[in-house]
Image: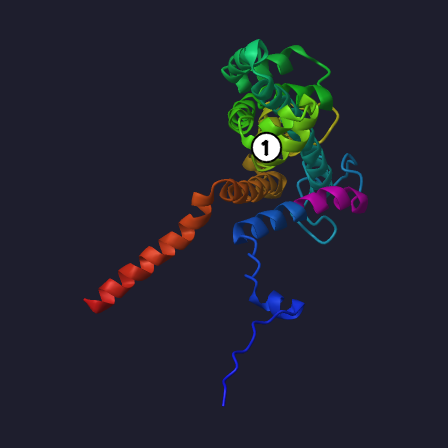
Amino acid sequence: MTTETAAPPTTTAAIATTRAPRRRPAPTLVIGVGIVLVIVLFGLIGPLLVQDPLAIGNDGMQPPSASHLLGTTQTGQDVLAQLAYATRGSLLVGVLVAVLALFLSAFFGILGGYLGGWLDEGFSLFTNVVLILPGLPLMIVIGSYVEQRGLLLIAVVLAITSWAASARVLRSQTLSIRNRDYVQAAKIAGEKPWRIISVEILPNLLPVMSSGFVFALISAILGEAGLSFIGLGVVGTQTWGSMLFYAQNGQALTLGGWWWFVPPGFLIAALGCGLSLINFSIDAIINPRLRSAPAHARRVRRAEKKEEAAA
């Protein structure tokens, strides 16, 4: 009687069962995306559901009630309506600044790092000069001398002071990637520089660029809020910083009107927390050591508990 050895599974279903399970997204990424998504939806849909934020009423400094869910300002304006429009304005400024900063950092960092030579030296010199410029004082000076501070002007000023650090990171990564075999093979094959940058180099830099975009978004929202709080923000557009500015001028803290300044401050903190969690998750993807650090810490704690139990 002979014994036959069972053949290994060859069907698609059997092979699928032997594959490694999919890696679940990090909890920090899920929480961060959830917080940011809620705030973005509020900024997009909220202005369509509230009343005119500039409408003046007779019931000034009223606490939250059924008619005004977040109370009213000193002149009777609805705080919830102002918060919805301010959320949309702050997000618009943040996204515009982040896009401009990403473009500038990619242009000076990737292009200069790949082409090298005098162009790289010139771009590096210009990047270092911009990097040492004091961001907030420069924005205050420009905002003080310009009366018509539109959305585009503030975005350009914030973008100019926030792209240099990311450009240096992208340049260093590009210098490392341009000497790899597949890039050299593309050069030998006669590929044009723009195609090598867009096809061979740029995909490898997407995680770094994503992290820089999120960081620029955080910096832009906080920078705009700081400028608006001191009265140098965007003119004609409501933002979280402008709400805090008018709350300070209306003596909301002295009068006990917490519902006027707490909501915008809370949304600034919540959005910063959500974007920071997303940025930490992207950093963990870029750096495998950060991804494996929590598991290593758990193993160390389990080993310490076993030693304590044995003792």
Residue 246 to residue 257: above or below: above
Rendered-image quadrant of the C terminus: bottom left
Residue 249 to residue 259: above or below: above
As drawn, which residue projects farthest toward the front?
Answer: 1
Q: Residue at x 60, y 23 (%)?
A: 110
Q: Is residue 44 magenta?
A: yes
Q: Residue at x 51, y 40 (%)?
A: 286
100 horizontally vs 207: left or right: right
As drawn, which residue projects farthest toward the left?
Answer: 311
Q: Amino acid at mark 1?
A: Tyr
Q: Which residue is mark 1?
A: 182
Residue 4 to residue 255: above or below: below
Q: Is residue 103 magenta?
A: no
Q: Which residues are magenta?
A: 39-50
Q: How is the image coloured?
A: rainbow
**Residue 63 image offset from top left, x and y in percent:** 65, 47
Decide if residue 225 is in sight here: no
**Residue 283 image offset from top left, x and y in percent:** 51, 40
Q: Residue at x 24, y 68 (%)?
A: 309
Q: What crowding class fits label 1: few (fewer than 14 Cα within 10 Å), some (14-19), or many (20 or more)?
A: some
**Residue 242 image offset from top left, x and y in percent:** 65, 30
Closest to the observer, 272 or 146: 272
**Residue 244 image offset from top left, x and y in percent:** 61, 32
Q: Secondary structure at mark 1?
A: helix
Decide if residue 86 is in sight here: yes
Closest to the observer, 256 or 83: 83
Q: Main secondary structure of the magenta part?
A: helix
- Tell me where residue 180 sits by quadrant: top right
305 horizontally vs 196: left or right: left
Closest to the observer, 266 or 135: 135
